[in-house]
Image (tube, rainbow, N blue to C red):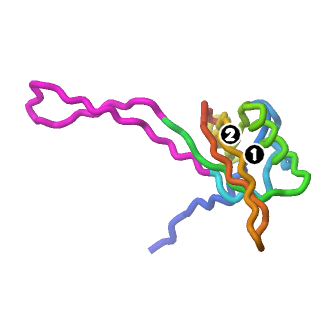
Amino acid sequence: MSTPDFVEAHLDAIHITGTKAEALSDANKPATLKKFDVPDTTELRELKYLNNPQGLTQYSPGFRTMKGTLEMDLERDSPIIALLRQRYLERKPVFIHCIEDAEAATGAQGIGYEAVLGSFPATREAGALRSISVELGVNGFWLI
């Protein structure tokens, strides 16, 4: 039996920028990022009709929701942490670029998200590094 060709999450390059068009570099790639999670769900509407010979409830797709979290340890003087804090206070979006294959053709390299921050809680716990776990609401996405 051959070993499956797994996709390891730490090999993806994740960048956080203030604009969609900002150049991606090591400067906007957080070194202490621990988790980026954006579940993509579609609301299902129940449709029940008379004269339905099977008697089955039908379903229609409704609104799509993409809401998740971004977790990282705080770095002193980090421009990324400063950007997140600033955007949260200004109620403006950040742009998260997830590059899965930098060598692929444009449109197949990964996915980008425009997201607003729903929280900015800085965690303080005895014997642990300070960290943040930010709630994200995705307003749009695009293929990179």
Verify whether residue 114 appears in magenta: no
Disc 1 secondary structure class: strand
Label 2 vs 1, first from the N-terminus: 1
Q: Is residue 103 visible?
A: no
Q: Is residue 141 visible?
A: yes
Disc 2 secondary structure class: strand
Question: Which amino acid is tagged 1?
Answer: His
Residues at badges 2 and 1 in contact (C-beta under 8 Å)? no
Q: Is residue 53 left or right of residue 5?
A: left
Q: Which residues are magenta?
A: 37-64
Q: Position of residue 75 (x, y in %)?
A: 85, 57
What is the C-alpha distance between the residues marked 2 and 1?
16 Å
**The N terminus lies in which quarter of the figure?**
bottom left
Q: Which residue is mark 2?
A: 117
Q: Residues within 10 Å of mark 1 (few under 14, many from 20)?
A: many
**In this view, 40 is above or below 52:** below
Residue at screen point 68% across, 39% down: 117
Residue at screen point 58% across, 59% down: 7
In which quadrant of the rendered view does residue 28 lie?
top right
Verify whether residue 41 appears in magenta: yes
Q: Which residue is mark 1?
A: 15
Numbered marks: total: 2
Residue at screen point 71% across, 33% down: 93
In which quadrant of the rendered view does residue 66 lie?
top right
Q: Residues within 10 Å of mark 2 (few under 14, many from 20)?
A: many
Q: Position of residue 64 (x, y in %)?
A: 47, 33
